Image (cartoon, rainbow, N blue to C red):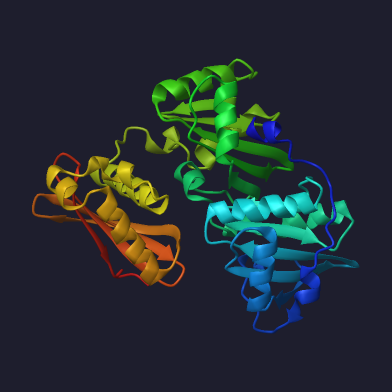
Amino acid sequence: MARRLFGVTGIALWIVLIVVLCIPQSGAIANPLFKKLPQGWTAKPLVVPLDNISAISTKLGGRITKLTNTMLSFQNNQVQINVFFCPTTVDAEKIYIAVLKAHNGEGDYVSRVGNTVVEFAKSNDVNFVNQARGVLDFASLPLDLFTARYIKKIPADWHLNDSFPAPTEQAAAIGKKLNADVKTVSNTLFVVHDKKFQVNIIDCPTPQDANKIHQAILAAKSDPAFCILIDSAVIEFVSDDVKIAKEAVYELGIKPNPAQTAGKQASKEDSLETQARDFVTLLAEQQFEKAVENFDDTMKTALPAENLKEAWNALLAQFGPFEKQLDARSEKVLSYDVIYITCKFQKDICDVKTVYNNQKQIAGLFFVPTTKK
């Protein structure tokens, strides 16, 4: 739905200046995209000098922390793949739009997953570009934080192509079109069993807004399985195969598979882990006013939103930009439940330790060294 509103499809070729700036280097930055290449495919890495990254960043209008260039070859065909690693989704959006414009607004040669933009350059063979896209491991790149709230896993036989949040103004336009308020929209594209499959996630400020959007989308769908409602979020599946849509809810971890959870109830620890992970997501998205809503009275006095922001930004100054959540563990201390969420930052990892009282309110918050490396 959202992708149709944006109109991002087509073929293009951008002869980029970047190739002139690249130099072969045996110690080039390791890139997870190329870890699972089939037999016969080769990847020759190059790296852009740091001073040139700054110039390219200025030219494209968004910050770039790393930029890799790789010549991917198979038989007699080659395509250069430029990968832009950005510190935030906002920067990645700017880079994506700039590169897309350079391709005349057509998207077959550009992909984006979270904070990473991937460009297919130096090739005018769209069939080979699509073939190259199919062998890259896009699922190795972290999804943006909003999308990762709902898409918790990607099956091995689901090939991820793109995943990115829509610009704020486009999310607002979708809400206006569907007569409800919208906070965030993300679009994630897969290829499943050789079929294109898209997941659009629409986050609303209230369940009432989400219900309006859910009803509006359902009215245009041939089967209710193509659109589901989860609290204040609407998840739309765009495909001509309803069977895949029905599988997607469980395959992507959006909902637990009832066949696996029949007769079981989520434990208290599972529920608190979800709360703790959502809390970390709010910190990473700088939504401090919302993050303090579940503080107990003592915490609200001791650590209001402004002070929480200062504490989080001090952590970022030490560990670098937040990248993703990793493992979780829990323990019982007297009458309190303690949840540890291990978080990966650009420079290191640490634990966000949240302490919950009997009312499941946050009664303590600590940033501590992790016991798992």
Q: Image quarter for residue 38? A: bottom right
Q: Position of residue 79 (x, y in %)?
A: 82, 64
Q: Residue at x 20, y 52 (%)?
A: 303
In the rendered image, which quarter contains the N terminus? top right
Residue at the extreme bottom: 26
Along the viewing direction, whichever of 170 and 202 lies nearer the viewer: 170
Q: Image quarter for residue 293? A: top left
Along the viewing direction, whichever of 58 and 129 lies nearer the viewer: 58
Residue at the extreme top: 219
Q: Residue at x 34, y 65 (%)?
A: 315
In the picture provided, is 89 more to the left or to the right than 19? left
Q: Position of residue 341 (x, y in %)?
A: 33, 57
Relative height, residue 230 to residue 28 (above, below) = above
Q: Position of residue 123 (x, y in %)?
A: 87, 60
In the rendered image, which quarter contains the C terminus? bottom left
- Mark yes or no: residue 346 visible: yes
Q: Image quarter for residue 313? A: bottom left
Q: Position of residue 202 (x, y in %)?
A: 52, 33
How many dots with numbers?
0
Along the viewing direction, whichever of 198 and 203 lies nearer the viewer: 203
Relative height, residue 316 to residue 151 (above, below) = below
In the picture provided, is 4 more to the left or to the right than 359? right
- Mark yes or no: residue 41 visible: no
Q: Residue at x 52, y 22 (%)?
A: 213
Along the viewing direction, whichever of 365 and 43 lies nearer the viewer: 365
